[in-house]
Amino acid sequence: MAKPKNISGVVYSTNPDFQYNETVNAASFTLPPQQQNLRVMLDKKNRGGKMVTLVAGFTGTDSNLDTLAKTLKSKCGVGGTAKDGEILIQGDFRDKILQLLVAMGYKAKKAGG
């Protein structure tokens, strides 16, 4: 029997009928934009001194996160990625992204220093 990645602490069981209870970490639904609490911040840790704009706090499916990331990247005209519930946009676009998110109906605010 192959072990799933999230085994929640169980290493071995002698019960032949034992089933691993897989927990779903990703959200199976997306909150509406009015209920999202997004934080827009500048980050340059572990990036070789390069700055990225980080949008954190998104609650929803990966496909909706990718769609929002694609929209933000195209509006800013730069590259980026969406992973682990965060959107990374290359460069310092905090003000522009904040305006775009508010215009789309999201609850967003600047965070960090």
Image (tube, rainbow, N blue to C red):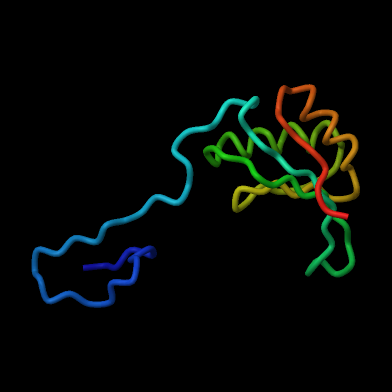
- For residue 16, side relative to residue 92 (left or right): left
Residue 82 x, y percent position in the rendering? 66, 47
Residue at 89% x, 50% y is 91
Query: In the image, is 87 to the left or to the right of 74?
Result: left
Identify the image quadrant of the N terminus: bottom left
Please name the residue shown 33% across and 71% down the image: 9
Residue 19 is drawn in which quadrant?
bottom left
Residue 61 locus on image (x, y percent): 52, 38
Q: Nearer the viewer, residue 80 or 85?
A: 85
Residue at (10, 71) in percent of width and height: 15
In the current view of this chain or complex, which residue is farthest to the left? 16
Task: List x then y, in percent, for residue 111.
Answer: 81, 48
Vertical placement of residue 1 versus 56, above or below:
below
Q: Nearer the viewer, residue 80 or 95?
A: 95
Q: In the image, 71: left or right of 25?
A: right
Count every numbered label the image shows and give the total. 0
Tell me: residue 61, above or below residue 111.
above
- Residue nearest the viewer, comparing 23 with 49: 23
User: How far from the left and from the top, in percent, is residue 58?
Assistant: 63, 41
**Which of the 4 image quarters holds residue 62?**
top right
Front in this rendered view, residue 86 or 102: 102
Residue pictured at 67% horizontal, 37% vertical: 37
| Residue 21 picture quarter | bottom left
Left or right of 113? Residue 22 is left
Quarter that holds the C terminus: bottom right
